[in-house]
Image: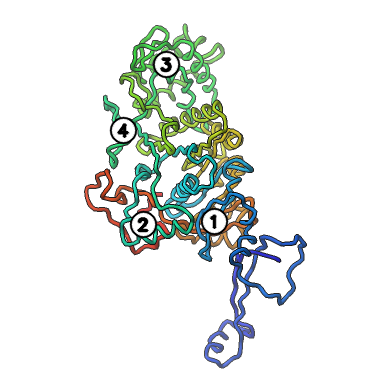
């Protein structure tokens, strides 16, 4: 039996010689027959005797066991639902290619907003944690970096659609996939402190409870060797002043001693309570002729030292509220995935340089923790705008961490879920190490890039006009990508979608567009 997927359909009139003959045919003046020809991309041949079917052989639509056999679902011991196909039946991916058994990592590409990349990534996490397929799912963790508004600060709140007119349809859509239409159950939220706030309250507006502010003390910054993450631009590794960065990092580790209980530090005889104090100290030691050889290095010129100083001073505005020793110790301020199943780190209020610093430091620390604890439990790391953190050209500390996760994460139990607008601008090794590749709406120029060579030509064209909620999923178990639609999120994706019965104050009744189809996220004002 030969099975396949219809990837292209053509329709024409047999007997028509000119384009205008269609009018004569429709009026009954000229005889003709309608011809419909479908292009079928072969997925499976059983037994494996690769001989094409004979002309005139009957083709039928596969259902039930035949459909499962054609799509290799019968060979998947652990099937994870990712949506429904064009036939309305459930589509699965092989969990062995997600959890590291035979492969790992997920790459999601598409235009911002209409491609619904973040929505699909969250749906995958929801299916992993609640689908009953992932082994030890209760021990699995997820680390999510939010860079687009406060939309991910309501993952633990039910969507208002569940109590509206379309609530039954939404619950039925999840039930068809074997999932419950419910929000995430165990979620921790972290946000940077309000700039200039002496109490270090979290810098959020829509959510007033359940959010912890995070920062690093001066002592933690020096002892942890976090200075290289201040210089996180991809061009930095090409410059000579990076030698000074590593020299100063080692010097800070040796010279720093705690001063008090608020995170301040005594460095080379000088008391540092703020990031500005630390920057002033480093700049003085690096530029002073008497201390330059010890702090900057014996062969460093004044020009290289000044280049380091200029870049370090330019970081004060972005990092002064994140690196400080002027606030008493507060339990829960450190970003960690140990206390909750899902951890959301909100970065949207930070400057680009601060976003890079936080992302790099948190990823590096979680990688070290997983390496020390072993691969017993999985850590799913979800990072949007991957083309910013791991671009194809250049090098940076963040890119090194992401490359390490892409190449070694499978053995460590760290799974990367990366989302990007343009896969062609992301480091090749990260994309190539992703076993599962997902594509939403694509720009026509981007769709022609070789990074999307796994898509047949017909699907490339379809991807340029795909609607929100439609994704093309490629996996090693199936030779052809499958078009799927996934349900609308059962959790709130913005403040207006939070049910009024929950504790979050909305300031008014939420507005819900019930006329929009249940399976497809609304394109207007799309948060992702």
* Label 3 – label 1 distance at C-alpha: 52 Å
The answer to which quarter of the image holds residue 347 is top left
The residue to which callout 3 is attached is 283
Task: Give whichever of discs 3 and 1 has the lower sequence position.
Answer: 3
The residue to which callout 2 is attached is 524
* Label 2 – label 3 distance at C-alpha: 49 Å
Q: Please name the colour scheme applied to the rendered image.
A: rainbow
Of badges 3 and 1, nearer the viewer stands 1
Q: Residue at x 62, y 79 (%)?
A: 35
Q: Residue at x 59, y 53 (%)?
A: 474
Q: Label 3 near label 2: C-beta < 8 Å?
A: no
Q: In this rendering, would 493 be left or right of 362?
A: left
The residue to which callout 1 is attached is 472
* Label 4 – label 2 distance at C-alpha: 29 Å
Instruction: Please tell me how crowded label 2 is: few (under 14), some (14-19), or many (20+) other residues with Cα within 10 Å.
Output: few
Instruction: Please tell me how crowded label 4 is: few (under 14), some (14-19), or many (20+) other residues with Cα within 10 Å.
Output: many
Front residue (pair 270, 380):
380
- Residue 392's disc is none
Which x, y percent locates residue 203? 31, 34
> Which residue is situated farthest in the bottom direction here?
29
**Does any portion of residue 290 appear in the rendered image?**
yes
Task: Give whichever of discs 3 and 4 has the lower sequence position.
Answer: 4
Secondary structure found at label 1: strand
Task: Give whichever of discs 4 and 2 has the lower sequence position.
Answer: 4
Of badges 3 and 4, nearer the viewer stands 4
Task: Give whichever of discs 2 and 3 has the lower sequence position.
Answer: 3
Task: Give whichever of discs 1 and 2 has the lower sequence position.
Answer: 1
Front residue (pair 360, 280):
360
């Amino acid at each position: 039996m030969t099975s396949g997927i219809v990837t292209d359909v053509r329709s024409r009139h047999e007997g028509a010689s000119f384009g205008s003959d269609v009018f004569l045919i429709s009026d009954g003046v000229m005889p003709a027959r309608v011809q419909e020809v479908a292009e079928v991309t072969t997925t499976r041949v059983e037994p494996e005797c690769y001989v094409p079917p004979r002309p005139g052989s009957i083709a039928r639509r596969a259902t039930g066991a035949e459909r499962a056999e054609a799509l290799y679902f019968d060979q998947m011991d652990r099937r994870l639902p990712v949506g429904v196909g064009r036939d309305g039946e459930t589509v699965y991916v092989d969990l062995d290619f997600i959890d590291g058994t035979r492969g790992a990592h997920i790459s999601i590409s598409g235009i911002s907003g209409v491609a619904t990349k973040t929505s699909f990534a969250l749906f995958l996490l929801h299916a992993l944690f609640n689908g009953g397929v992932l082994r030890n799912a209760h021990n699995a963790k997820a680390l999510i970096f939010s860079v687009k508004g406060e939309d991910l600060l309501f993952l633990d709140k039910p969507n208002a659609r569940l109590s509206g007119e379309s609530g039954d349809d939404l619950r039925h859509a999840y039930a068809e996939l074997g999932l419950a239409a419910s929000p995430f159950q165990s979620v921790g939220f972290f946000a940077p402190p309000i700039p200039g706030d002496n109490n270090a309250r979290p810098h959020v507006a829509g959510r007033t409870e359940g959010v912890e502010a995070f920062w690093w003390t001066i002592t933690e910054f020096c002892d942890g060797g976090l200075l290289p993450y201040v210089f996180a631009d991809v061009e930095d590794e090409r410059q000579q002043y990076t030698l000074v960065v590593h020299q100063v990092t080692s010097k800070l580790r040796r010279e720093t001693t705690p001063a008090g209980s608020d995170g301040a530090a005594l460095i080379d005889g000088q008391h540092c309570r703020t990031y500005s104090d630390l920057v002033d100290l480093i700049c003085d030691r690096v530029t002073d002729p008497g201390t330059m050889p010890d702090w900057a290095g014996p062969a460093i010129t004044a020009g290289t030292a000044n280049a380091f100083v200029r870049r370090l001073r330019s970081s004060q505005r972005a990092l002064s509220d994140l690196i400080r020793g002027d606030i008493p110790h507060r339990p829960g301020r450190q970003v960690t995935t140990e206390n909750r199943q899902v951890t959301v780190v909100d970065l949207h209020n930070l400057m680009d340089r601060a976003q890079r610093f936080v992302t790099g430091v948190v990823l590096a620390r979680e990688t070290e923790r997983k390496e020390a604890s072993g691969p017993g439990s999985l850590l799913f790391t979800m990072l949007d705008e991957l083309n910013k953190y791991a671009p194809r050209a250049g090098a940076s500390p963040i890119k090194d961490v992401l490359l390490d996760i892409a190449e070694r994460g499978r053995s460590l139990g760290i799974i990367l879920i990366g989302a990007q607008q343009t896969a062609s601008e992301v480091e090749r090794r990260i994309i190539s190490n992703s076993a599962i590749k997902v594509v939403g709406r694509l720009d026509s120029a981007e769709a022609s890039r070789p990074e999307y060579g796994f898509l047949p030509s017909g699907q490339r064209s379809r991807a340029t006009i795909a609607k929100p909620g439609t994704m093309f999923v490629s996996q090693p178990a199936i030779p052809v990508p499958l078009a799927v639609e996934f349900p609308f999120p059962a959790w709130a994706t913005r403040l207006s979608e939070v049910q009024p019965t929950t504790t979050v104050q909305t300031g008014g009744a939420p507005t819900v567009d019930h006329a929009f189809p249940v399976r497809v996220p609304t394109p207007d004002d799309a948060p992702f």
